[in-house]
Image (spheres, rainbow, N blue to C red):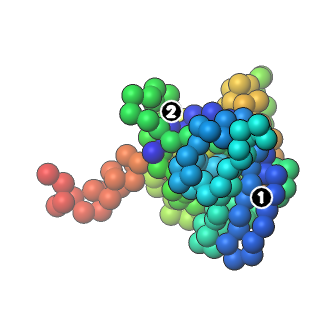
């Protein structure tokens, strides 16, 4: 479980494999602070650490990504040198600064417009078919692992606004029109929609 508050920017240092991709990612995380098998959110996708650096050689870890995850997320678009939003798994007692995020990407959206409003950036994003019903004005959504508040919703798209700090501390500041982004809808919205489909299941 995660919160959508990015704690580091990683950099793809190596890519290998065909059907199953292995990504090595440079990070500011200390290698001795990461256990093999640990879960880390990468651009919003929860991945398992399968290898890591040793003390003194710089922080890096490796993850392996299945064909299914490559197909359903933007991870198949990654190239050597790309920056990646990272978040360590939530611990009991940690501050919940964003909202509850599972790290299971619901679909890939397309940035249709980027516009500047003062120092803020507004993105209009088109989600994949069927996902917009889970997105509500003033609700939460995760874009590439970043917890954001939805500012506006239409039948085909939604708007989010990011502050200068978020633009600088995550990859969102680099997004341009046409970019593909990982989306995870609010967990509560998903269950609310499920109950509306089967009201007899509600207590």
* Badge 2 or badge 1: first in the primary sequence: 1
Judging depth in this view, the residue of 111 and 108 nearest the camera is: 108
User: In percent of the image, x 69 and y 60: which residue is there?
Assistant: 75
Residue 202 on image: x %, y %: 18, 54
**Residue 87, located in which quarter of the rendered image?**
top right
- Against 85, residue 15 (above or below) is below
User: In percent of the image, x 71 and y 38: which residue is there?
Assistant: 55
Residue at the disc numbered 2: 98
Q: What secondary structure is found at the residue carrying circle 2?
A: loop
Q: Residue furthest bottom?
A: 19
Residue 194 on image: x %, y %: 32, 59
Real-space CA distance between mark 2 and mark 1, rounded to the nearest whole angstrom? 26 Å
- Against 167, residue 87 (above or below) is below
User: In percent of the image, x 75 and y 72: which residue is there?
Assistant: 17
- Looking at the rendered image, the disc whose residue lies closer to the viewer, 2 or 1, is 1
Seen in the image, is 181 located left or right of residue 80?
left
Task: Give neighbour class at mark 2: few <14, some 14-19, many 20+ (Cα, 10 Å).
Answer: some
Question: Does residue 122 appear in the picture of this structure?
Answer: no
Residue at the disc numbered 1: 78
Residue 146 on image: x %, y %: 61, 40
Give me the disc on residue 198. Answer: none
Residue 50 on image: x %, y %: 61, 58
Quadrant position of the N terminus in the picture: top left
């Amino acid at each position: 479980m995660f919160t959508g508050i990015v704690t580091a920017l990683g950099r793809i240092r190596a890519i290998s494999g065909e059907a199953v991709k292995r990504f090595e990612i440079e990070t500011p995380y200390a290698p001795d602070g990461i256990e093999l098998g640990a879960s880390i959110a990468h651009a919003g996708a929860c991945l398992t650490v399968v290898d890591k650096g040793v003390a003194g050689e710089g922080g890096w870890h490796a993850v392996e990504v299945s064909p299914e995850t490559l197909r359903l997320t933007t991870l198949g678009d990654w190239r050597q040198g790309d920056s990646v939003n990272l978040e360590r798994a939530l611990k009991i007692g940690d501050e919940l600064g964003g909202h509850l995020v599972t790290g299971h990407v619901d679909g890939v959206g397309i940035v249709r417009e980027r516009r500047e409003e003062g120092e803020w950036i507004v993105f209009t994003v088109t989600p994949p078919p069927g996902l917009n019903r889970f997105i509500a004005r003033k609700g939460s959504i995760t874009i590439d692992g970043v917890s954001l508040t939805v500012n506006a919703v239409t039948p085909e798209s939604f708007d989010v606004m990011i502050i200068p700090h978020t633009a600088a501390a995550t990859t969102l500041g680099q997004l341009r029109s046409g970019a593909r982004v990982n989306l995870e809808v609010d967990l509560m919205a998903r269950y609310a929609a499920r109950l509306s489909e089967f009201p007899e299941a509600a207590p």
